[in-house]
Amino acid sequence: MRLSVCLAVATSSLTVRDASSFVSPKLSPRPAAFALRSSPKLGRRNASPLRMSADSDESDKTKIVVIGNGMVGQRFMENMIANDVDKKCQLATFCEEPRAAYNRVKLTSYFETLDPSDLSMTSEFDDGGRTSWYDENDVELYVGDKAVSIDTASKTVTGESGREIPYDVAVLATGSFPFVPPIPGRHRPGVFVYRTIEDLENMLAYARANNVKSAAVIGGGLLGLEAAKAVADMNVTSHIIEFAPILMCRQIDQGGHDALVGKIEELGLEVHCGARTESFVGEDGTDDGDESSDSPVAALRFSNEGWDDLPVQMVVVSCGIKPRDEVAKQAGLELGERGGVVVDEQLKASADDVYAIGEIALYNNFIYGLIAPGYTMADVCAKTIAADTLGYDLKLAGDDRPEFTGADLSTKLKLLGCDVASFGETHPSEDDPDISSMVWNDSEGGIYRKLNFSKDRTKLKGGILVGDASDYSRLHTMYIEEGEVPENAGTLLPPPGARGGPLEEEEVSTDPNAQICSCNDVSRGAIAAAVQELGVDGATLPALKKCTKAGSGCGGCEPQVKQILSQELEKLGGALDTSMCEHFGMSRPELMALIRTDPDPSSVDSFEKILAKYGSGDGCEVCKPAVASILASMMNGIILDDGRDALLDTNDRALANMQRGGTYSVVPRVPGGELSPDQLIALGVAANKYNLYSKITGGQRVDLFGAAKHQLPDIWEDLGNAGFESGHAYGKALRTVKSCVGSTWCRYGVQDSVGFAVRVENRYKGIRSPHKMKGGVSGCARECAEAVGKDFGMIATEHGYNLYVGGNGGTIPEHAQLLAADIDEDTVLTYLDRYIMYYILTADKMERMAPWQKKLPSGKNGGGPIEHLKEVIIEDSLGICGELDNRMQYLVDTYHDEWAEVVKDPARRKKFQQFVNTDETIEREDMLEFVDQRGQQRPADWPADGQDHTNWAAPDDDVFARSEKSWSRVGSVADFPVNVGTPVLIGNTQLAVFNNAQRGEWYVTQNMCPHKQAFVLSQGIIGDAAGTPKVACPLHKKTFGLDTGAQLDGGDLKILTFPVKLEGDDVMVELPAVEELDAILGTNGLRVLKSDCTDIAGDALKVPFKSRNGGSPPGVGLKDLETDDELKVTSEAGAAMNATAV
């Protein structure tokens, strides 16, 4: 039975009831005629009477009220549903926040998408902050309603809204709130706590509004470092302020601190330990001892002798938690001296039928602030209620009862990109006679490991791992199970990467009882059973995570879960799916091998031929760019020709990087960073001529931002006349080869690093690869070009160059490894030719060189992947060097400057025309507001998701249903390239016409993506999802059905579609009158603003408009209607809606 394996999948067949149906059978019902009172915070939903009569169909069910809808409260309800197989109970939960439970552990990842649904514990949030899980499981959810009192005598809970809910069992899961030390000035503007999504949004808004450059984070523990990452993600310099002498003093020691600080400071953050913060100083200079000043924070003042004030414009306090027990205190429950609800082993509080779990529960005078103990409490509490209140037999051995007797506080985290883990005994005293410690301290590599053994070194007692914790699961299991350590315990000490041999995945225990996920207490046996239950076809990583919850907490165990999935699938005769997408049942390396070895190259020289031979369907935004990259790497044709532009991702199709609002950036190639004065002048002239924002990039070249697509050929014609070529900043190709000035100028230089960088960059320019490539050449050992942080790099020696490969300066920095030493320039190029081509032939899609290299096998005699590369590239162990050399030379010989090819060819230039049906253009400022910043123009900040100018929706699903329509010609068939979208302009409305020749179908939609109101859909890749034709927005890859307009990737956005037909050579679209069309989709009315301004032209018709966010510019209503025609337009657009401007 699936219930034996999958948690929280039981769903109720009952319909969702009003909140008022919550009446205990033990209480006398009150009359139903209570006044309606909505949540004062949200003013929406909760629109039901507060009580109903006792003859409810649900009146005989046990009412369980959960106070708090955080991670632990949510887990309790899921466990309760799984235990309550006979549907004896009815659940309700108070949720103070404006949305249901989300993963607070991963709060810092919110900045990756700014989409709360990505953190949801269940599924996508709707506009009211709910998810479908609550309806599906018949759980009453009170979003935005904080529980303010419990009456344990009458057994009721009252919400801030006035709602009073009776209970049979109440479970307190209110969690904690951030502890804020009594520092003078803590009330100032600019001082925040770090706890919720709203906290992050408020910080981000304040930082943007006040141009915050520097911020202090008070606290250097787990929460403080997470907050510091959040601040750093805002592009704000982060100062970590810690009172203790070291960071994370409960988890690590001085050695771990030193390694962690080294990693943190490499990222540009600053650490101040032993700091005694005296006050937060305001801009007016007051330290606010009497709290009379409301001046924004401007500095930290310390009581440390000799410490100066630290200038900051924002402070984030994240230095601990306090149990949120005010409701428990009001109810008269027994509390601890420092807070928290006192509980026993069954999590029972001092009042009958009241339980407490999570960070509010005080067990043995200890508050557990980690998620794993909270989940254990949720499990014990749910089982206790199931047995004691609902009468279930839990089939426990003997007289055993569910118990919480404490929890393992071991942790493994990735803080600011650095592995940090601790388990067991971490701080033994130096004279402890029962402990023998071993330490690995690699200060250069930033790795510190300390393992504590029993005196005879037969048992592992605990450890600290900083910088490399990849073998944490093995060591933690060894500690938990008190297993025997190897005869030579010292073999456990080095990090896996320093042990020699291949960097293989850590071996996962085969013991079914071994804990794999500590957050959710999921064993290997549970995961294996779930794979068996799901079967070969259903067992995917997402399905397995949803079913077992393994990997859905902190995510640290996901590699082990994936490894178990692979092993269990193999037992079933299956294999872990590595398919690129639904259209190709193979990985990119496998498809590349088939194309590369095909005996008839002409049968695989286009996407259509490759799809017909090795795939199915129409293709999509995943496989099309991957195949385009393979074709470019094999044949190297002009990427815009012969229909290949239909395969290209967001940037390649325009030969430029798409930026916010659908504008583009222009990045000419500057080999080695070397520019002539005339070229510098030409760049300035172009920037002034086209009003482009100018910036020097990290790769030693100039980036010009803000160009419209139709301007690009003219800009590049000007730059080409000055000697510039395409910089391929838009492509998965070589970007730059950075250099220092070397021996030509520097007194320390030993080789001409500039000259060699120019040579290397000119050799590999334009070569397409699975991901972008960057190189560097340093003229001496001082390494000013940071070559070992690049995909490949050369450092000059007295005898030539040392060649390093496999580095990465991105999200997870990697130092490149030495491939060959003291070799001349020609030999460097020979080895680089082979290395790059080996990467092109064998890497997965969108895989950088560093992770690709780490996955390679070890050398024959060990030594890891670098030894394998030496054997393949230098010794030709695979016998493929000849092929690698020839393929690379072909790419070098067939190089072409893509922008030069466009500029000189009218047909290619036409691809950049803004609208195919008119020479008229719409300027960038008419689509997105631009603001001045330090004397240059940049686009106004995008509103956060959920605010105005995001998640647009038409007033009605069929807004033009009652309009009089006619067929309008938008161009000839030849005007619309096949298998791509092309924009047209009708009045002030931009539409996208899709000539889907692959299916023999045409589609017309709005050109604006509703997510960020950017006019870009015509630039998206078209394909299909399970047979449904779709387009992927080029900005954030949201997909929409071309036939229905519905969002296909899980959201509820929608685009408007229009009927289209061919009459001879004419492409005809059925449209309403231009005035009606412009009223809904006109560019002027949809312009994205930084404020609550209305449209810039003042001429967009004002019609009723439905916003998914419930917001509208204040003070804007219907346009004064003077004629019957105008009245008809507005009334037929849906006048029943609240009137706001489009």
Image: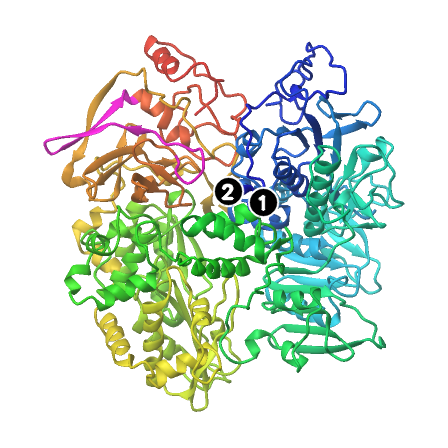
Question: What kind of element bears circle 1?
Answer: helix
Task: Place residue 461 in its image quadrant.
Answer: bottom right
Closer to the camera, 571 or 1115? 571
Residue 1073 on the magenta segment: yes
Closer to the camera, 355 or 332? 355
Residue 513 on the magenta segment: no
Task: Place residue 959 in its image quadrant.
Answer: top left
Task: Place residue 1130 in its image quadrant.
Answer: top left
Closer to the camera, 1050 or 857? 857
Q: Is residue 1047 visible?
A: yes
Q: Position of residue 83 (x, y in %)?
A: 64, 38
Mark number, residue 898: none
Q: Position of residue 641 (x, y in %)?
A: 19, 54
The amino acid type found where label 2 is placed reads Asp
What residue sits 29% from the left and 44% below the top? 1023
Please, which colouring scheme is shown?
Answer: rainbow
- Residue that lies at the very extreme toward the front in this rendered image: 398
Q: Position of residue 464 (x, y in %)?
A: 70, 68
Give the spatial CA distance, label 1 vs label 2. 9 Å
Pick the quarter of the image with the C terminus: top left
Marks 1 and 2 close (CB-CB < 8 Å): yes
- Residue that lies at the very extreme toward the bottom in this rendered image: 799
Q: Is residue 820 left or right of residue 208?
A: left
- Circle 1 sits on which residue? 208
- In the figure, 494 relative to 348: above or below? below
What residue sits 64% from the left and 41% below the top? 79
Dot 1: within a 10 Å radius of its alpha carbon, few (fewer than 14), some, or many (20 or more) residues? Answer: few
Span highlighted in magenta in the image? 1047-1074
The amino acid type found where label 1 is placed reads Arg
Question: What kind of element bears circle 2?
Answer: loop
- Circle 2 sits on which residue? 941
